[in-house]
Image (tube, rainbow, N blue to C red):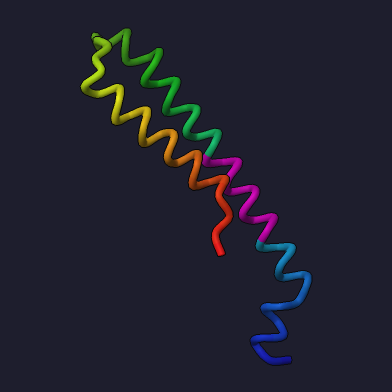
Amino acid sequence: MTIKDWICSSTVVKAAIILWLVSAGFIVFLLGQIDAIVHHVLYNYGLHFSYDWATPYWGLLRSIYIFLTVPHS
């Protein structure tokens, strides 16, 4: 069996897709945890809302979600 045959086998493709979906799920969960820290916990430590930090934060967070959902080829 050559490397090309091994990479193209259905088992490897299925494993890669499952790994991608699991890691994407963990990333979404962890981003939710970071978002909860920013929007709940940090306010207890004196964080004051400002569009100066919120706009880039929202943009980066949404960009990460977009790149998770756009398939890469």
Is residue 68 covered in magenta?
Answer: no
Above or below residue 41? Residue 10 is: below
Magenta stretch mostly in which secondary structure? Answer: helix
Question: Over which residues does the magenta segment extend?
Answer: 17-27
Question: Count the marks: how many?
Answer: 0
What residue sits 37% from the left and 14% below the top? 41
- Give residue 38's quadrant in the image: top left
72 sits to left or right of 36? right
What residue sits 64% from the left and 48% below the top? 22
Above or below residue 51? Residue 26 is: below
What residue sits 24% from the left and 10% below the top? 48
Instruction: Pick whichever, 71 or 5, lies toward us.
Output: 71
Give the quadrant of the N terminus. Answer: bottom right
Is residue 20 covered in magenta?
Answer: yes
Looking at the image, the residue that sits furthest to the bottom is: 2
Give the quadrant of the C terminus. Answer: bottom right
